[in-house]
Amino acid sequence: MPICLVYGGAKNMSNFLSLSDFVDLSRIFQKDKFSDLNAFHYLGKSLTNWLNKLLDEFGVSENPMILGEVSPHSFISGRVYVAEGATVEPTAFITGPCYIGPGAEIRHGAYIRGNVYIGKDAVVGHTTEVKGAVFFDAAKAAHFAYVGDSILGRHVNLGAGTKLANLKLKSDEVSFRDPKTDTLTPSGLRKFGAILGDDAQTGCNSVLSPGTLVLPKTGVFPCVHFRGTLRTGFAK
């Protein structure tokens, strides 16, 4: 059953960035839940609304619902769903709202700060911090990463130490460069990290500035700071 969204993210509802330009929605787990094609509906307050409706469907109350393998030495609080087949290792810290799908791995020392969707077989690794983000199937931030207010497509791999910055130094509205028109467009969001398409990659210790878009099957080389929209090849 599709989840209807109450739009509460970007201030300007005319802003539209197609999620299907980044993610093959026909191949994802729970594809019926991602019916809205505007990527901004899975960021900011709209993501919170969407997650809470998803957790309602699974019958999650104000306390965690744990069906997977969770270490007694982890910390989980609030509206958190851990699916059968998921693994949460010792010292992981997770607060809701959060959905963790089957086969997902939340590794030792991971920090999930809420408003997070972790899809099937995705990985949040050692000392990786995540907030306000969507990980589609098999997306991996396995080592020392920061993923803030961002969307990772299927089979995205973030090299160790990757940082997806979500807040400008001036703390004002984040803009993005539209991949179709190449125009600089306001997002309506003060916090907006990056959207990475299916099979995109980042090298170790790379940094993506707020509002960065990385199209499918492209990537950023190690130790590179990238901002803007990457349509083809690798940024270096």
Image: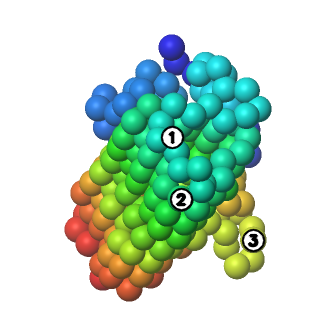
Count numbered badges in the picture: 3
Q: Nearer the viewer, mark 3 or mark 1?
A: 1
Which residue is painted at 53% across and 50% down in the image? 71
Report how far apart the C-alphas of labels 2 and 3 lie in the structure: 35 Å
In this view, 76 is above or below 33: below
* Other residues around mark 2 within 10 Å, as few (<14) / some (14–19) / many (≥20): some
In-image side of 168 versus 109 (left or right)? right
Q: Which residue is mark 3?
A: 171
Mark found first going from the N terminus, 2 or 3: 2
Crowding around mark 3 (Cα neighbors within 10 Å: few <14, some 14 to 19, many 20+) is few
Please tell me whether mark 3 sits on a helix, a strand or a loop.
Answer: loop
Nearest to N terminus: mark 1 or mark 2: 2
- Secondary structure at badge 1 equals strand
- Disc 1 versus disc 2: distance between alpha carbons? 16 Å
Q: Which quadrant of the view contains residue 170?
A: bottom right
Between 38 and 191, the one nearer to me in the picture: 191
Q: Are marks 3 and 1 in contact (CB under 8 Å)?
A: no
* Colour convention of the picture: rainbow
* Left or right: 129 in relation to 126: right
Three-letter residue code for mark 3 = Ser
Residue 1: % across, % down: 51, 14
- 2 or 3: mark nearer the eye: 2
Looking at the image, residue 30 sits to the left or right of residue 57; the answer is left
Identify the residue under disc 2.
Answer: 90
- Amino acid type, label 2: Pro
User: What residue would you read off at disc 1?
Assistant: 100
* Quadrant in which the C terminus appears: bottom left
- Give x and y (percent) for residue 214: 38, 60
Please tell me which residue lies in front, 141 or 175.
141
